[in-house]
Image (cartoon, grey):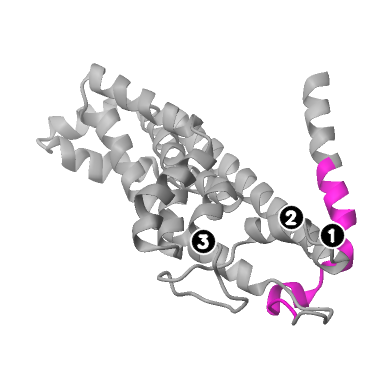
């Protein structure tokens, strides 16, 4: 009980501290305007919010189907040895520091094709992949074996059973994994440092060019000698914290409902 209260207190302290620092820069301009011209006050980081949504959206589009397919293969089709190997590989991938993933993507792709949003999304997708796959596996394991047996007893093939019976039942868990992956990727800075930093201060949705992102803006603005930019860094950090908190709590709620439905259904 004491340890739980301490964890909540630390979280509340961090959120409150960031909020107090962010209040001077939390306004509509932060979300609707780009960086002000040098020497002028005001402006915002709209280009970073749009860039982050682009990066995370492309990464989710890549990681979600691959992660779900991996989870289905491991849970429904793979043998014990193969399943153990894949699970161990996913756990190791999940534990690799994001900066290592950034360096690997830089050496494999950026040096050949130069920086752009698509390559940055690949790095984020690698980070999201194990979260989505492992969350989906956990929910697939909760599906009663009797559902599979009843479907196959009616002459339905195994892959149709997975597609028509198992997957619809586990939709909540899949959404949970995707939500947790998005929350993780949205706050990553290290991969972005190697893949998408040579951007302009304009709103861009072109994945063939580098785009701004909220974590990188926080990193650069926090080191600026300009107090106005430092305030914007705190404001961006608070927005990011709120996003991660909301998505994480939503994911936990969806997973809890899905698990309860599987146990009682």
In the current view of this chain or complex, which residue is farthest to the top? 81
Image quarter hosting the N terminus: top right
**Residue 30: in magenta span:** yes
Q: CA distance from mark 1 to mark 3?
A: 25 Å
* Residue at image point 57% right, 47% down: 190
Q: Earlier in the sequence, mark 1 or mark 3?
A: 1
Image quarter hosting the C terminus: top left
Tell me if residue 41 comes above or below residue 1 in the rendering: below
Residue interval drawn in magenta: 14-36
Give the structural element (helix, strand or loop) at label 2: helix
The residue that label 1 is drawn on is 22
Q: CA distance from mark 3 to mark 2?
A: 19 Å
Q: CA distance from mark 2 to mark 1?
A: 8 Å
* Residue at image point 66% right, 51% down: 246
The residue that label 2 is drawn on is 237
- Please provide percent x and percent y for residue 240: 68, 55
Residue 106 shows up from this direction: yes
* Residue at image point 49% right, 61% down: 55
Badge nearest the viewer, 3 or 2 = 3
- Please provide percent x and percent y for residue 14: 82, 42
As drawn, the label of residue 196 is 3
Residue 160 left/right relative to 195: left
Residues tagged 2 and 1 counted as in contact (Cβ below 8 A): yes
In the current view of this chain or complex, which residue is farthest to the left? 155
Report the front residue among 102 and 166: 102
Residues tagged 3 and 2 counted as in contact (Cβ below 8 A): no
At label 3, counting other C-alpha atoms closer than 10 Å, the crowd grade (few under 14, some 14-19, many 20 or more) is many
Residue 107 left/right relative to 229: left
Residue 183 left/right relative to 265: right
């Amino acid at each position: 009980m004491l340890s739980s209260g301490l964890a909540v207190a630390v979280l509340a302290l961090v959120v409150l501290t960031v909020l107090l620092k962010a209040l001077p820069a939390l306004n509509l301009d932060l979300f609707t305007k780009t960086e002000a011209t040098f020497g002028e006050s005001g402006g915002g980081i709209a280009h970073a919010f749009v860039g982050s949504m682009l990066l995370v959206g492309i990464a989710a589009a890549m990681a979600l189907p691959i992660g779900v397919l991996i989870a289905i293969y491991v849970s429904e089709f793979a043998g014990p040895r193969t399943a153990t190997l894949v699970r161990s590989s996913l756990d190791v991938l999940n534990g690799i520091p994001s900066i290592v993933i950034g360096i690997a993507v830089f050496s494999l792709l950026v040096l050949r094709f130069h920086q752009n949003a698509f390559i940055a999304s690949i790095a984020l997708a690698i980070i999201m992949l194990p979260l989505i796959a492992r969350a989906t596996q956990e929910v697939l394991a909760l599906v009663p074996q009797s559902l599979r047996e009843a479907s196959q007893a009616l002459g339905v093939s195994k892959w149709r059973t997975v597609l028509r019976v198992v997957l619809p039942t586990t939709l909540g868990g899949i959404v949970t994994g995707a939500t947790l992956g998005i929350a993780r990727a949205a706050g990553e800075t290290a991969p972005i440092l190697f893949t998408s930093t040579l951007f302009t201060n304009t709103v861009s949705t072109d994945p063939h060019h580098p785009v701004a992102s909220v974590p990188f803006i926080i990193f650069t603005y926090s080191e600026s000698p300009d107090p106005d930019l430092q305030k914007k860094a705190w404001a961006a950090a608070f927005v990011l914290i709120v996003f991660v908190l909301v998505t994480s709590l939503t994911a936990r709620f969806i997973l809890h409902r899905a698990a309860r439905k599987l146990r009682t259904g």
